[in-house]
Image: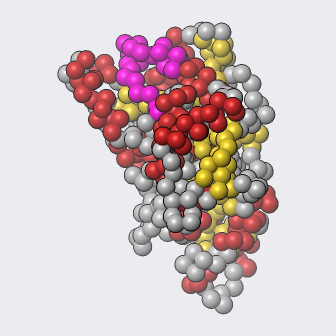
Amino acid sequence: MAKKLPIIAIVGRANVGKSSLFNAILDRREAIVAVEAGTTRDSIASKAEYKGQHFWLVDTAGIKDPADEFEFTIQEQITQAADSADVIWVVVEADIPITEEDRRVAKMALKTRKPVFLVINKLDKAKGADLSGFDRLGIKPILRTSTTQQKGIEQLLDTLVELIPKGVEYEDDDRLKIAIVGRPNVGKSQLFNTLAKRQQAIVADRAGTTRDVNRTVVKYHDREIELLDTAGIRRSGKIEVGIERFSVIRALAAIEEADVAFMLMDVNELNVQLDQKIAGMVKDAGKGLVLVVSKWDAAEGKDAYTRDALAPQIANNYTFVPWAPLIFTSAVSGQNVTKLFDLALDIDYQRRKRIATRDLNKWLKQALDAHPPAGLKNRLPKLNYMVQETDNPIPAFKIFGSHTKFLHWSYKRYLETRLRKTYGYEGTPIQLWFIEKHVTHKHGQSPTREIPQS
């Protein structure tokens, strides 16, 4: 059995403090916080850890009346969060009586039959107020927080880790799962359909645990490959037919389930910031990654020179995943489409690769001899021994030594670069854990899994 991390969705109407709660838990300003309502326009996902439990935390935009297409997509986004999350936090304001929007959010969350918490935020603004009226929303447990005063956060997280399992188990078979992710309208569904048609589909539209993720299973070189298209269901009415809506929560659920992700970017609309954010999610989830430039047939003035000139520019925007292959494709002409399967199979092979302990320690000695680690006076890091983890789907290595906390980040990068040069691991993140001798190892934040701030 393999495991994927639980997903916690923070939902609620605009300006109840969802982003502040998100930031308080991450202890960093990842989301935008502003006085005006509705500032947070896109869901933002980040991995969090509390008392040894790792989970994804997703901050969603607030619900508003869907008077226009843009506000409709915000409401749809929260609905998707409720569908895909393992736990839902409904946030309300302590100093404002229950509103109709609060009731709508609570009703939507309870309908999912997922575990739901009611978080009464902004306690600092409601000193002495009677909060018993919030019981009418029908949600338990009820937690009370003040993000400005950092009150109630630990109790909220204590309640969470008691509820969620250490990891959501799913069947671990030999089937390779590929998630197709990216911004709206970059050609995800078209690539999904082209890949499915290139090989005989053996299972069509298989129902999955995550709604709005289209699935199909094909065979390639006698290997079953399951494709997960995160473009989802196209709706009529408020949204123009044919326009795809990107949802972080939906993509995150698919990424967690997948082994490899194809991150699509439109050659005519290279939106660096959001594309970087999606690629960062894949890296942080520890999955294989292929950067796919789509719609190459429609590129203006395309030729070999243009591609050779464009590739370094794109790679420069993804220096945090230098190991991810870059490929130019066209779902219309079929250019390089089948090659995507070959890339995915090779990445899967790299992720399963195991290196003998004897060879690893020979490599470590050579790396140390070529470039010893620097340190402080009487605090010189010493690396003694190295092993590969056998129970981790991500290539992961434990390096035991002393004074490892004084290792500079650049030295850790040096070791990773040298390890890749020797053993490959193209297309996949790797983890290096630096462990003090005689200390029980517990996985913390890996130095090789930081999401760039874009």
What's the magenta region? Answer: 323-343
Q: Quadrant of residue 37?
A: bottom left
Residue 393: x and y in percent read 68, 35
List x then y, in percent, for residue 225: 63, 19
The residue at the far bottom in this view is: 128
Most foreground residue, 133 or 277: 277
**Measured along the vertical axis of the image, is residue 296 above or below residue 150?**
above
The residue that appears at 47% across and 61% down in the rendered structure is 31
Q: Quadrant of residue 312?
A: top left
Residue 428, image x and y in percent?
55, 33
Q: Quadrant of residue 107?
A: bottom right
Q: Was residue 339 drawn as part of the magenta stretch in this picture? A: yes
What residue is at 33 percent from the left and 39 percent from the top?
A: 316
Instruction: Locate residue 211, reporting x and y percent.
Output: 63, 37
Residue at x 48% of width, y 26% of height? 189
On screen, residue 434 above or below 178? below
Rendering colour mode: secondary structure
| Total numbered badges shown on the rendered structure | 0
- Residue 66 seen: no
The answer to which of 274 and 133 lies nearer the viewer is: 274
* Residue in the foreground of this view, choosing between 330 and 108: 330
Q: Is residue 437 left or right of residue 181?
A: right
Task: Tell whether position 359 is magenta.
Answer: no
Residue depicted at 69% across the width and 39% down the height: 387
Quadrant location of the N terminus in the rendered image: top right
Q: Is residue 383 visible?
A: yes
